[in-house]
Structure formats: C-alpha cells, structure tokens
Image (cartoon, rainbow, N blue to C red):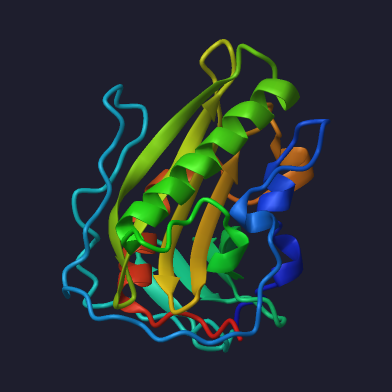
C-alpha cells in the first residue's frame, strides 16, 4: 500500500497569497462550516473549460475514457489508478485532500473546502448560481492580480483561466483559475478551482502548481509543478465529474 501523507501537501488559498501586505478577501481565506446542503440535478456529460485566446493554458477537449474514475475522499486504501501512471487516493488525516501520485511518487494534491454563501458580500440573492459563481471567479482573479503585482513584481504576468461551465459531481458549477509567468516569460505557477453552490454553501475543489525558481516558488509550497498539473488536468476533471462530493460537514 502506498504511503500517502497529507502533511506533504500545502494547498490552501492562504498560502497562495504571497504579497507582503498580507490579507485579502479570497474565498479560500474563509473557514469552513458544518452546514449540509442539497444538490441539484445536472446533465450527465461534463463540460470542460476553454483556454484563453493567447493559447497559454492547455485545456482538455474531453476527459480520458477511463470508464468512470470514482475516488473515495475518506479511505486512503481505496485508491484509483486512472491511467498513464497516475494514481489518486485520499490522503491520510482528517482533511479532505486527495494525494496524487505519478509513477509511484507523490507529485501533488487536490483540496476541498466549503464556506457559506453569506460570507461573500458580492453574491446577489436575486441572481442565478452561474452568475454568482462567475462573480466569485472574477473576484478571485482580481485578488491574485493585485497580490502578485505586490509580491512578485510589476512585470509578473498573471493570465486568467476564465470561468467556464463544469459539472462537479452532479452539481453544475464552474472551473476557473490562473497561470503565472515571470517577466521573462518563464512559467511560474498554475492554479485551478472547481466550484459549485451546494445549498447555502459554496464548495470549491482546488489544485495548485508551483515551478522551480518561480514566484512564490517550490521551496516554500511544493506540490505539482505547472506541467504536471496540466498533464493531470484531464484525469482530474474526470474524477471530479464522476466522484461524489466529499463530506465537508
């Protein structure tokens, strides 16, 4: 049995922020709650995201045909071989984190969080979920544009992965994120969030990658590098489409 350790993965949004000025009202900075929410019915086929016009982010056309990669978020012994050397299982410990291996080596993690809709002041109670999730994605990206300009320099390029529809388990949601590049064009980081409204809460599942010599850099945060996460993305999207949402109560 593989030794999957949650302590090796540092994926919270708090650690994503690197600016010296510190705090920002990003969703991942909000603590989770113990409320339960019901899900709504969505089409059975997943919708994958589209890349920015400049082609810097490679998005999969379709998840790989693995026959349904259902992952258990709780039991580390119930791992899933999703193909091409990728193996995914719950990390040991209480936190809802999936440990991701490639060719027997842990290369990253995927973390689930939940926070109340009431904590997001820009949510419009009269708007539909798609509108509110798009606003959340825009706010998330705005936070990191400002943060990286302060923490990584004004020539740091943050390239949004614009929000696109994605069915998270059986719940319609969105995928969004960003890429980061140093002033000379060197790849620095890659970040993906899969988010949906569930009852009175927002559930967000994230994967983050950092590159050697980039900002904030691998020495402090570890985990995927950008190419690994791009390679894993089709398998991740199949897992998140096929697997039930984790219990975040």
Does the image show residue 12?
no
Residue drawn at (56%, 49%) of the image: 208
Q: Position of residue 234 (x, y in %)?
A: 32, 56
Left or right: 20, with 131 as reference point: right
Q: Position of residue 59 (x, y in %)?
A: 29, 43
Residue drawn at (36%, 39%) of the image: 162
| Image quarter hosting the N terminus | bottom right
| Image quarter hosting the C terminus | bottom right
Question: Relative to 7, does residue 161 appear above or below in the rendering?
Answer: above
Q: Position of residue 176 (x, y in %)?
A: 41, 47
Q: Position of residue 15 (x, y in %)?
A: 73, 48
Q: Nearer the viewer, residue 2 or 45?
A: 45
Left or right: 69, with 120 as reference point: left
Residue drawn at (58%, 81%) of the image: 248
The quadrant in which residue 64 appears is bottom left
Q: Nearer the viewer, residue 92 or 136?
A: 136
Residue drawn at (50%, 88%) of the image: 78
Question: Relative to 204, does residue 189 appear above or below in the rendering?
Answer: above
The quadrant in which residue 113 appears is bottom right
Question: Relative to 71, does residue 5 appear above or below in the rendering?
Answer: above
């Amino acid at each position: 049995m593989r030794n999957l350790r949650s302590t090796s993965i540092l994926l919270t949004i708090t650690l994503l922020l690197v600016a010296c000025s510190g705090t920002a009202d990003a969703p991942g900075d909000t603590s989770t709650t113990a409320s339960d929410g019901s899900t709504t019915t969505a089409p059975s086929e997943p919708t994958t995201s589209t890349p920015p016009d400049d082609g810097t982010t490679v998005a999969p056309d379709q998840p790989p045909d693995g026959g349904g990669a259902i992952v258990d978020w709780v039991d580390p012994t119930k791992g899933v071989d999703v193909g091409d050397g990728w193996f995914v299982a719950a990390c040991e410990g209480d936190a809802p984190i999936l440990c991701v291996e490639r060719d027997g080596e842990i290369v990253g993690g995927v973390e689930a969080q939940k926070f109340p809709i009431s904590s997001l002041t820009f949510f419009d109670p009269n708007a539909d979920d798609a509108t509110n999730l798009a606003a959340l994605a825009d706010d998330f990206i705005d936070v990191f544009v400002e943060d990286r300009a302060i923490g990584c320099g004004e020539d740091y390029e943050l390239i949004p992965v614009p929000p696109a529809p994605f069915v998270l388990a059986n719940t319609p949601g969105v995928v969004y994120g960003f890429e980061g590049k140093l002033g000379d064009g060197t790849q620095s980081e890659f970040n993906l969030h899969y988010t949906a409204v569930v009852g009175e809460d927002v559930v967000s599942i994230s994967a983050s990658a950092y590159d050697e010599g980039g900002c904030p850099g691998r020495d402090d945060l570890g985990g995927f590098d950008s190419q690994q996460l791009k390679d894993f993305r089709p398998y991740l999207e199949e897992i998140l489409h096929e697997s039930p949402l984790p219990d975040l109560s």
